[in-house]
Image (cartoon, grey):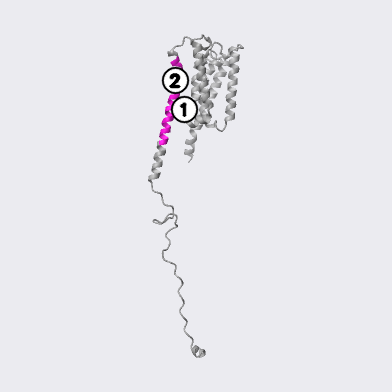
Amino acid sequence: MAAGRWSGAMPTSVWRLSAGGAAVGLAITVGGSYGLGWRWTGFLQNGSVWDWLHLLLLPVVLTALPLWVRTHRTDRAPWRLAMGAVGVLLAVLILGGYQLGWRWTGFAGNRLWDWLHLLVLPIVVGCSPLWFGRDQRRSLGRGWRLGLVALAVGFGICLLGGYQLGWRWTGFAGNRLWDWLQLLLVPVVIPIAFGWLAVRIGEEREAADERAARARAASPAAPRPGAVPGSAPGGGGTASASPATAPAAAPPSPARPGAEGLAG
């Protein structure tokens, strides 16, 4: 029994130890790089917010996604608050990086093309629950459809402006089909693969349910405990078929001697 409990709890404990060890190692490395000048780490040369986003954005999304799938229906308010805080923080950093001269953000000089390289894959991975089935899409409501339509329209406008109207801030000019394939091939393959997998899982579940229904319909009903074979359903056994008989009449008592003479 103890071995079973240990084997069941072992994956969770190993995961926690691994995550804790990785966090401690990262903290020591960051502290040594910025506090003690450890040049071998390379953190000093990649110390802007832009560099850290390239390093951590996708792992953070992959880590938060299972937790969101399990808790977003019951804890919507905390998730909305967290996403809103992230959005506000990112807007402040963008404003400071492009308008206020915050060089430590590393945003200056990066155009829309560079932001697409940073954000497309994490966004597609974060939206992966949409490709698993109807239940996930219904739980998110219709807002995600409007969001996708708005993104598609905005992307088309940026393409037109970047290649035809000379919008330099897009960074699209000079990028050809090969560059776009490098950018979008993996993000396009992911939803296609997830959609195919969702369809396959749905078909297998439907087939399994159909086989189980056929098996239940073909198997005879099991007799209830205590039931006598051959008895009618609902009966508590075989009742006696003999009719109820009335108690036998008592024989006449013999006349006492001399009773007739007294009667005469």
Magenta region: which residues?
180-206
Q: For the residue carrying disc 1, how many other residues have a C-alpha within 10 Å: few (<14), some (14-19), or many (20+)?
A: some
Residue 264 in the image: state x and y as whole percent: 50, 90
- Residue that mark 1 sits on: 131
Place residue 248 in its image quadrant. Answer: bottom left
Inspect this view and state whether residue 213 appears. yes
Residues 227 and 45: in front is 227
CA–CA distance between discs 2 and 1?
15 Å
Query: Residue 196's image quarter?
Result: top left
Question: Which numbered dot is residue 189?
Answer: none
Sequence-wise, the earlier of marks 2 and 1 is 1
The amino acid type, in three-letter code, at marker 1 is Trp
Disc 2 target residue: 186
**SS assignment for the magenta stretch, majority:** helix
Structural crowding at the residue carrying mark 2, measured as other residues with C-alpha within 10 Å and reported as few (<14), some (14–19) or many (≥20): few
Q: Position of residue 194 (x, y in %)?
A: 44, 27
Q: Position of residue 237 (x, y in %)?
A: 43, 58
Residue depth check, mark 2 versus mark 1: number of the one nearer the observer: 1
